[in-house]
Image (cartoon, rainbow, N blue to C red):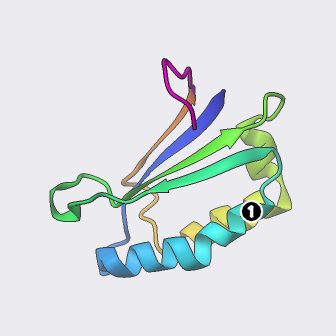
């Protein structure tokens, strides 16, 4: 399965707690409208003081969907614009990967 993994870093001046609150309560609901996204998972570090990132966002894409399809849409543009409210866009990493589950199930 094709997956976009976004390693997120909060903006300067924003506490980790405020970052997580905004991300999960304001930003994440916007992702529900993204076309071709079958699953959206968020991960928050258990010990943020020792973590290089403030969170990990994973978007699982339908087989025929590209990242361009997702973020070229109106919903994708809204999601991208909203990241400017809490994410340091220059500090994180974005990976597009093909995931293969080696064992286990969802």
**Who's the residue at 56% across and 20% down the image?**
100
Q: Label 1's element? A: helix
Q: Answer whether residue 78 is visible to the viewer in this image.
A: yes
Q: Is residue 32 magenta?
A: no
Task: Check the image and name the residue furthest to the front.
Answer: 104
Give the farthest residue toward the left. Answer: 50
Percent x, y of residue 68? 76, 41
| x 45%, y 79%: residue | 21
Measured as percent of width and height from the top left, residue 60 is found at 66, 40
Residue density around tag 1, few if under 14, some if 14–19, many if 20 or more, within 10 Å: some
- Apparent side of residue 31 relative to residue 100 in the rendered image (left or right): right
Residue at horizontal 51%, vertical 71%?
23
Residue 10 percent location from the top left of the image: 37, 67
Instruction: Decide: is 50 above or below 6.
Output: below
Q: Main secondary structure of the magenta part?
A: loop
The magenta segment: 98-106
Q: Is residue 99 magenta?
A: yes
Asked whether, in this view, residue 43 is left or right of residue 39, the answer is left
Total numbered labels: 1
Per the image, the residue denoted by label 1 is: 32
Q: Nearer the viewer, residue 29 or 13?
A: 29
In this rendering, the answer to whether 34 lies above or below 106 is below
Using the image as rendered, state which of residue 39 and residue 68 is in the foreground: 39
Residue 25 placement: quadrant: bottom right
Q: Is residue 82 left or right of residue 12?
A: right
Evaluate whether residue 85 shows in this view: no
Locate residue 1, reporting x and y percent.
66, 27
Quadrant placement of the C terminus: top right
């Amino acid at each position: 399965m094709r997956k976009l993994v976004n390693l997120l870093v909060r903006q300067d001046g924003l506490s980790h707690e405020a970052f997580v609150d905004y991300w999960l309560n304001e930003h994440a609901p916007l992702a529900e409208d993204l076309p071709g996204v079958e699953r959206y998972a968020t991960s928050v570090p258990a010990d943020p003081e020792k973590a290089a990132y403030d969170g990990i966002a994973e978007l699982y894409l339908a087989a025929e969907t590209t990242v361009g399809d997702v973020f070229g849409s109106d919903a994708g543009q809204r999601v991208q614009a909203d990241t400017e409210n809490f994410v340091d866009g220059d500090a994180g990493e974005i990976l597009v990967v093909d995931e293969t589950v080696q064992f286990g199930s969802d």
